[in-house]
Image: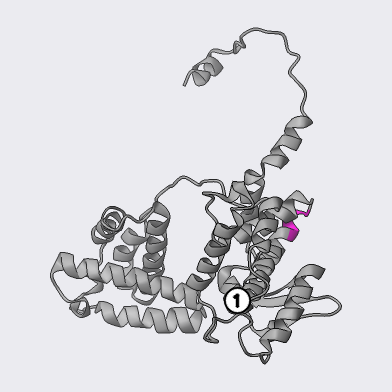
Amino acid sequence: MKTYPLPIYVQRFFTERLATQLHASPNTIASYRDSFRLLLKYAAGQLRREPTSLQIADIDADLVGGFLNSIETARGNSARSRNTRLSAIRSFFKYVAVNEPQLLHHCQRVLAMPAKRHDKRTIDYLTRTEIEALIAAPDPSTWSGRRDRTLLLLALQTGLRVSELINLNCGDVVLGTGAHVRCLGKGRKERATPLRKDCAMALRSWLAERAGSDSEPLFVSNRGDRLSRDAVERIVRKHVNIADRQCSTLKGKRVTPHVLRHSAAMQLLQNGVDRTVIALWLGHESVETTQIYIHADIQLKEQAMAKTKPLTAPAGRYRPSDELITFLEAL
């Protein structure tokens, strides 16, 4: 009887499927890696066998279901995180199903597992007053203050993801006529985002002070290393705590690097920019993704409400004229 050792297929999935065929980004590979580390540790504990001795048949729908429940209960992960882990597992079993048709039925049971529904809360973003307070927070008399102000200004004007910000090199900034910044976004898609005059001036000053070659990082730490994701989060948190002394609405507000991205999108929307342009600006795969900003914009809804008129229909209770409609209305 043929056996299907799990380690062989996991290694092929990462080296052949993700890295070679799909050219997956480092962030995607890291996310899938973490999902499988957790899954294999759970499977080894449940089956009392080392991960290297597991077979694909051991990772069935029941075990995957138990794993997903455990990361919610034991680890306290959200439904969104649970769905991310499930997505990685599904991708692996799709790969196995194509390469080993004999395991198709086994794979289909895992692939049929549904994602968990979860509440989608309204996005957080900064108002114009809060943006101005945050940009004014860094101390311009220090090297780190000038770096932080430039980084915050660039993030709030371009809406770059934190991964795109930290991977920028000095050569990715193009100044002069048609000033813009180039970045490699999700799906390895390169895009160019134009720069306002104030942002271009700040970058010009920073580049002169930074004095780095085109291939060197645009933003660096005190040690000269490329900034990490955690470092950017600390920078944002530090200056929000300073800015809330001047802007009371920032007190207790959840502000992360991604909130700066949302803020850039909301500024575009509130100034009448079409959502198709916003999607291109942010590097979204689909225009529908920008719907979250329309839902979050209370000003847009207030403008729509102002255009409506009070109902002039006479008072009274509406009564359906058909028994079937009456039945349906009562459900």
Q: Residue furthest right?
A: 177
Q: Tell me: 181 left or right of 115.
A: right
Position of residue 80 measured from the top left corner of the image (x, y, whole percent): 43, 55
Q: Residue furthest front?
A: 141
Q: Quadrant of residue 50?
A: bottom left
Q: Which residue is mark 1?
A: 144
- 233 is higher (above) or lower (below) than 62: below
Circle 1 SS class: helix
Q: Which kind of residue does numbered mark 1 sit on?
A: Ser
Position of residue 13 measured from the top left corner of the image (x, y, whole percent): 39, 78
Residue pictured at 69% horizontal, 82% vertical: 172
Q: Please state which of residues 276 and 56 is positioned toward the viewer in this rendering.
A: 276
- 330 is higher (above) or lower (below) than 123: above
Q: Residue furthest bottom?
A: 213
Magenta segment range?
Answer: 273-277
Q: Quadrant of residue 100?
A: bottom left
Q: Please state which of residues 54 and 225 is positioned toward the viewer in this rendering.
A: 225
Specify whether residue 84 is in view: yes
Q: Please state which of residues 135 and 294 is positioned toward the viewer in this rendering.
A: 135
Residue pictured at 70% horizontal, 85% vertical: 209
Position of residue 326 measured from the top left corner of the image (x, y, whole percent): 53, 15
Position of residue 124 measured from the top left corner of the image (x, y, whole percent): 57, 51
Q: Tell me: 65 left or right of 20.
A: left
